[in-house]
Amino acid sequence: MIGILYFLFLLSSTTTCGHVGRGGEVSLKKVTDGGTGDECSCKAFLPSSTFNIQDLEEVEGVAVEVTHKLELELGKMESYESQITAYTVKIVNLTMEIEKMEGDPEAVNDTQTESMKIQIKQAEALVVELQSLVQASAAVFESLRETVTSQMSTLTQLEEEHDKNLVLETRREYIKIQLKLEECERRHQEIFHPDIGSCAHTGVIRASQPIVSQINADLSSSYKFGAWGKDSKPLNGNESMYWYSGYYSAAIIDVKFYDNYQDLILRNHFQHHRLQSSWYGTGNNVVLRENSLYYQRSSPFSMAKLNFTSMSYEYKLITRSSTKFSYAHSPNQNLDFAADETGLWVTYASEETNGRLILAKINEHYFGIEEEWQTSVYKPAVSNAFMVCGVLYAVRTADIQTEEIFYMFDTKTQREHYISVPFERFQESYVSLDYNPTDQKLYMYNDGYYLNYHLWFNHTAKAIEDTPSILI
């Protein structure tokens, strides 16, 4: 706009005190009274072509339209995930009904059979509908990418022919749109084709709505203490296996195993291990890795490992850890075990660090502490913590319904950052929260209920607030 005004000013000036020369040259002269004296002149070269403002306005209009379509597609991502969860539950319920009918076929009448056929057809129709929606979204992404590419080409042409400053702001908007489109495509990819095992990102940026499976296998709301999930590094044949351990106190006395998610929902465990009294644990931030349970031993206070394949048991003392510091809302959570793409971890606090959280890497071969990092986070102010790709994430309570991932510590750079990734709880309190690298989900045991969350990662720029490095 400034360039256009300047252009008009020069044109108006020539009508009163100068003329336009060849090649767009403007000569301005000032002559003293009497036609003699000093002469003052200036020259300016005007562009030989007029700026096509209509092209720029059209590009800006397309930018608004593309942004709107992207917002709609981003909203659909959450809808797809909710539908997938709903369809899974529906199929599991249908499976339960079919198994009952197969178990006692004489008790099934024609009406029940017809009703079951209708429900199966409805479930099939829902799956087909979801498939078409996913394909439609993929087509929208491709169309938007072609539009953005075309408009960027137009902007480049306008820059080459005219003043770059007039086009610069619009180009910046399109760069933002490009980044948003890439993130939208990644979220679509992460839901339907996640890049399992990859750490090519700069951290967690979003968590889904809580996906509630059901109440625990003991069907007891009084079993508020417990944990559940999948093996973080499953043995061959155990890739679909789930496990659960729950009790009315923070004690760990048994573990149930299920072949797959359906058996977990149907409560058909294929193994039930009751721990020897001398092996009992306390605290519920436990993990299963290579069919071994890592947990906090009651007495003496130590970290324990129970291998369910060989039924061997061992424990190790952690000299710096203390029983004085637990998480904000749950007692006896002194040791918190975690597993991610890079290995096995445990966090704790000590009197030496005045209750600040210590992160330690566990050597899985000799079952001992390999390396430690001290953070600036006060453990009693934290609700829970988990690991992703060698990065520690700490969680705190934001309000009666919301938790917030507020802090991260990167073991590679030894730097900490404050972030804000809120996510909802289903019930008021919880005692365990762990990430599983086999499906990139968070698993929570929330007042007796199985919950999980899908995580999204930042594949573009670092959207975090840096704080000073922590010296170990």
Image: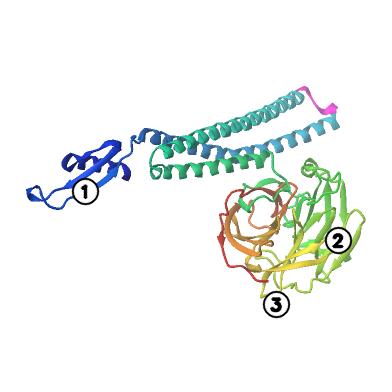
- In the image, taking residue 106 as reference, residue 211 lies left or right, namely left
Q: Main secondary structure of the magenta part?
A: helix
Q: Secondary structure at mark 3?
A: loop
Quadrant including the N terminus? top left
Q: Looking at the image, is mark 3 or mark 2 earlier in the sequence? A: 3
Say which residue appears at 43% left-offset and 39% top-offset. Answer: 160
Kind of residue indicated by mark 2: His
Q: Quadrant of residue 226?
A: bottom right
Front-most of residues 130 and 67 = 67
Q: Which residue is mark 2?
A: 365
- As helix, strand or loop, the secondary structure at mark 2 comes to loop
* Residue depicted at x 50% and y 43%: 175
Label 2 or label 1, whichever lies nearer to me, is 1
Frontmost of labels 3 and 2 is 2
Residue highlighted by disc 3: 352
Q: CA distance from mark 3 to mark 1?
A: 80 Å
Is 471 situated above or below 244? below
Residue 41 is marked as 1
Amino acid at the residue labelled 3: Glu
As drawn, is 424 to the left or to the right of 64?
right
- Amino acid carrying mark 1 in the image: Ser
x and y percent of residue 117 in the render?
A: 74, 25
Magenta region, residue range? 105-110
In screen coordinates, is 86 left or right of 292? Answer: left
Find out whether residue 68 is within the magenta segment.
Answer: no
Q: Position of residue 230 (x, y in %)?
A: 78, 49
Q: Badges 3 and 2: C-beta atoms under 8 Å apart?
A: no
Above or below, 129 relative to 175: above
Observer able to see residue 152: yes
**Quadrant location of the C terminus?**
bottom right
Residue placed furthest toward the front: 36
